[in-house]
């Protein structure tokens, strides 16, 4: 009998061993201009910013090269500070060579040098869709508020299952995981209009709204911010 | 039935111990049995609220428990289920792209929810036995004490279940006995959890009074009178209310040494809602006692 009891105790250790779950978290690496102007007043400066997101959607610190299509209209000093020289239209480009990918990445923005400066903070929108067997759908808009916060507003057609324990919503650049994602909060509204105000987030910082069952580490749905 | 209360959290599996359903025939006066067992399960998918399958991080549960029944007299049996060590764990999550660890696995080892109960004989003859019983589930387990507050070893609510069981002797000879049993219970739960109706059908074969082959079918149906899991803000957030399932269990037991019986059980979910999908295994030892 002694051996039976010992075997039972051993099973406790064996059967509760934590192992590894492998998930596919690859996303296409990309460079995004995150801070831009639609119009820049002649004689003014503007600090352009860009972020490089690696192949798992995490932001990496870079020092991109800034290029103007017409340096007589707009020119760059170091670190993305642009100067509006003369009135006209130009294309600005951020470039970065990533040694891990062994590849150049770039993003462009169109700028008009005029009499006034207009920050490019247009509203964005998207549609949440389920990627699981749980109900999740609805349209949303994303807006940069004057106080620097981000407002995400859901339309009346929003609907989510209230049967999933621990449903959370995130902002992320990788729709496959919450690795590096910004947790907005637990979902407490399951139908109809509602909104989230997130402090100090730029409208261009994240590409995706992600719904995730936090206790069980499983994606429920997502919506691309466009 | 006693351990039906343990099943409900998503990823929590149908942890059903055969011996806890020993009601139907009460224990004789000053007689009973105790069982030491371990039951475990891993699951990487679950039944959704629509009864469809979705993946989840591999979640496991191991329950080491003692269960006992004792006849105070020929008509009244008391019972206790004590899960003295419950391990709830989740796997590490690894990036296939970079090979790095995205989420570290976690484990919570703690005492589980104790259940106490009693069965009263209502009627008995040579062929059938009818009992009624009551059990009390105590929230002695732990919720959300792990680093990420995801895991739990109990459901966090106290409950009272009233049950009725009908047992029937179907065949009897020197070498083979066959019995059947039907039981149902209403489990009244607290803290906004929905009540449940728990039903069970069982058929057992006893060969030469030494080998036991027992098959069981379980059903748990939620009364849907609590709040939804999404609205339930518990410490851990992993407790899924309104879980429902059908499960099948096969148990084999044999007398191995001076009345000590070795048991092995396999339990699998057939269908369900908001419950983990997978197979649970149990090994145990039980012995009849007389005081």
Image: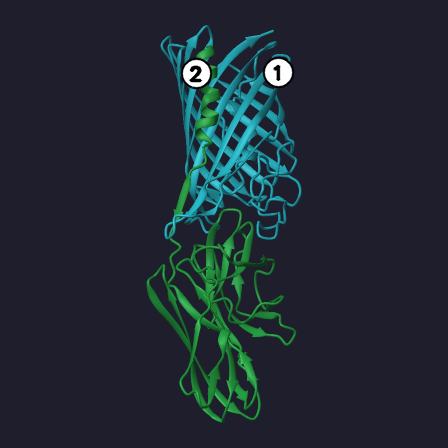
Q: Are marks 2 and 1 on the same chain?
A: yes
Identify which residue is drawn at 54% across, 52% down. A163
What's the mark number on residue A18?
Answer: none
Which SS class for mark 2?
A: strand
> Nearest the camera: B83 or A100?
A100
Q: Is residue A86 above or below residue A152?
A: below
Chain ID of residue with mark 2: B
Q: Residues within 10 Å of mark 1 (few under 14, many from 20)?
A: some
Q: Quadrant of residue A70?
A: bottom left
Chain ID of residue with mark 1: B
Chain B as rendered: colour? cyan
Q: Is residue A86 above or below residue B145?
A: below
| Labels 2 and 1: the sequence-earlier one | 1
Q: Position of residue A164 (x, y in %)?
A: 53, 51
Instruction: Kindly identify which residue carries mark 1.
Output: B75
Q: Is residue A38 above or below residue B55?
A: below
Which SS class for mark 1?
A: loop
Instruction: Kindly identify which residue carries mark 2.
Output: B262
Q: Position of residue A176 (x, y in %)?
A: 43, 56
Q: Position of residue B57 (x, y in %)?
A: 45, 45
Q: Residues within 10 Å of mark 2 (few under 14, many from 20)?
A: many
Q: Quadrant of residue A4?
A: top left
> Nearest the camera: A36 or A21?
A36
Label 2, label 1: how far apart the Cα atoms are: 28 Å
Task: Give the farthest residue toward the front.
Answer: A78
Q: Quadrant of residue B157?
A: top right
> Nearest the camera: B137 or A18?
A18
Question: Can the viewer see residue A37?
Answer: no
Question: Can the viewer see residue A172?
Answer: yes
Chain letter, colour green: A
């Amino acid at each position: 009998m002694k051996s039976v009891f010992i075997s039972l105790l051993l099973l406790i250790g064996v059967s509760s061993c934590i192992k590894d779950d492998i998930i596919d978290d690859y996303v296409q690496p990309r460079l995004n201009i995150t801070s831009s102007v639609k119009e820049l007043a002649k004689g003014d400066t503007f600090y352009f910013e860009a972020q490089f997101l690696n192949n798992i959607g995490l932001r990496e610190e870079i020092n991109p090269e800034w290029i103007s299509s017409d340096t007589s209209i707009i020119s760059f000093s170091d670190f993305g500070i642009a100067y509006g020289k003369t009135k006209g239209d130009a294309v600005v480009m951020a470039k970065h060579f990533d040694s891990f990918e062994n590849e150049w990445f770039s993003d462009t923005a169109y700028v008009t040098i005029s009499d006034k400066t207009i920050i490019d903070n247009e509203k964005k929108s998207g549609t949440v869709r389920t990627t699981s067997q749980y109900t999740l759908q609805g349209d949303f808009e994303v807006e940069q508020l004057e106080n620097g916060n981000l407002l995400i507003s859901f339309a009346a057609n929003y609907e989510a299952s209230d049967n999933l324990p621990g449903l959370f919503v995130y902002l992320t650049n990788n729709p496959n995981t919450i690795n590096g994602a910004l947790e907005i909060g637990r979902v407490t509204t399951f139908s109809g209009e509602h909104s989230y105000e997130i402090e100090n987030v730029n409208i261009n910082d994240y590409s995706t709204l992600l719904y995730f069952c936090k206790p069980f580490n499983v994606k429920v749905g997502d919506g691309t911010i466009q | 039935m006693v351990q039906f209360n343990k099943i409900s959290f998503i990823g929590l599996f149908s942890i059903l111990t055969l011996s806890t359903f020993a009601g139907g025939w009460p224990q004789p006066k000053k007689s009973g049995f105790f069982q030491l067992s371990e039951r475990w399960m891993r699951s990487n998918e679950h039944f959704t609220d629509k009864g469809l399958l979705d993946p989840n991080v591999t979640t496991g549960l191991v329950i080491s428990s003692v269960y006992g029944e004792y006849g105070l007299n020929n008509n009244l049996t008391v019972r206790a289920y004590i899960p003295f060590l419950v391990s709830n764990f989740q796997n590490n999550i690894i990036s296939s792209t970079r090979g790095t660890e995205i989420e570290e696995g976690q484990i919570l080892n703690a005492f589980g929810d104790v259940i106490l109960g009693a069965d009263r004989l209502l009627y008995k003859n040579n062929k059938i036995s009818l009992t009624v019983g009551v059990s009390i589930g105590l929230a002695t387990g732990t919720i959300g004490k792990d680093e990420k507050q995801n895991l739990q070893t109990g459901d966090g609510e106290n409950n009272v279940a009233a049950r009725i069981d009908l047992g029937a002797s179907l065949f009897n000879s020197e070498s083979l006995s066959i019995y059947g049993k039907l039981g149902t219970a209403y489990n009244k739960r607290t803290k906004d959890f929905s009540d449940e109706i728990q039903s069970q059908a069982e058929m057992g074969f006893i060969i030469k009074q030494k080998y036991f082959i027992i098959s069981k079918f379980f059903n748990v149906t939620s009364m849907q009178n609590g709040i939804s899991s999404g609205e339930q803000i518990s410490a851990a957030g992993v407790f899924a209310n309104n879980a429902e399932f059908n499960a099948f269990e096969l148990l084999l037991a044999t007398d191995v040494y001076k009345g000590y019986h070795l048991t092995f059980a396999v339990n699998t979910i057939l269908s369900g809602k908001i419950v983990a999908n997978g197979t649970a295994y149990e090994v145990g030892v039980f012995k009849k006692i007389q005081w």
